[in-house]
Image (cartoon, helix red, strand yellow):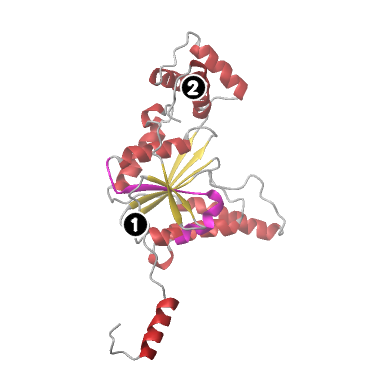
Amino acid sequence: MDDTFPESLRRIAAALDRLAPPAPAKPDFSAAKTYRHDPASGAFIPAPDFPLALDLLVGVGRQKARLVEAFERFAHGYPANHVLLWGARGAGKSALVKAAFIQTARIEDSLRLVEVDRDRVTALPALFDLLRTLPERFLVLCDDLSFEEGASAAKALKSALEGGVAGPPANALFVATSNRRHLMPREHTERDGPLASAEDAEEQVSVSDRFGLWIGFGPMDQDTYLDAVRGYADRFDLAVNDLEQRALQWARLRGGRSGRVAWQFARDLAGELGKPLPL
């Protein structure tokens, strides 16, 4: 401040500076492509790129093509719908999202992925308000989304997706995975009475309507499961004479076939053979 100002004005200016500190610096997304958001601190924690190649995810060709198309549209600034991937456990929903993102991010350098915890959905409106002020484009991923906390979390997600009076941010696309299409908790209690329970259920079910793109995943048949096992074995040089027999026995011990079970078998076999795997 100029030396000609009285001391009283200097003190007033200093007090105002203390009452209104400078705005916090905007987050820096130059360190990585993928991040985990911590709403308690507001930090975006860098994470390594997802190492599994998109072409290794077999048995989900239709889902893969639809998701990549949606991500590429969004990355290039065209309209795209929020995405819900739902269906069988272990079908590779989360892996598909991350692998499709990595492939798309190689084309569009400004694309970033921010993963949020399903138990912190109530922080999404504030996160979306922040992201709309930034130059990057964001895929916001919530894995295994459901509303165990009831209608409050569902209302927060609806608020984030609709964006209030400002509308949803044009540079953020929300992607969720769930075992259930309507995102309902496994046990919908009626502790607050049947009317309140019904209203909560309606609130939670209505959230799925905000996702313009639903991508479903069914159970994996034996041929597809073995295709996945052979794909991992070929890619990572896991050569054994009785590969298919051992893979089927592994699936029987696990009680079913899925992309996750195929990958877990590959990990076990790689450990036996002393071969490295990317994750």
The tag earlier along the polypeptide, 2 or 1, is 1
Residue 185 in the image: state x and y as whole percent: 61, 47
Let me know if residue 108 is in the magenta part: yes
Q: Residue at x 52, y 54 (%)?
A: 121
Tell me the magenta residue range. 107-126
Residue tagged 1: 170
Location of mark 2 (residue): 266
User: Would residue 76 be counted in the magenta stretch?
Assistant: no
Mark 2 residue element: helix
Quadrant position of residue 8: bottom left
| Residue 187 to residue 157: above or below | above
Q: Does residue 168 show up?
A: no
Label 1, residues with CA under 10 Å away: few <14, some 14-19, many ≥20: some
Which residue shows up at 46% across the image and 61% down it? 126
Residue at the farthest top position: 241
Residue 183, above or below 16 = above
Name the residue type under label 2. Ala
Examine the rendered structure and indicate whether residue 92 appears above or below residue 231: below
Where residue 172 sits: x, y (%)? Answer: 37, 53
Q: Position of residue 70 (x, y in %)?
A: 35, 43
Residue 236 left/right relative to 155: left
> Who's the residue at 43% across and 18% down the image?
233
| Visible residue check, residue 270 | yes
**Local SS, label 1:** loop
With respect to residue 105, does 29 lie above or below? below
Q: How many marks?
A: 2
Nearer to the camera, 20 or 188: 20
Question: Which quadrant: the N terminus?
Answer: bottom left
Q: Where is residue 216 shown, x and y percent of the image?
A: 47, 38
Cβ atoms at labels 2 and 1 below 8 Å apart: no
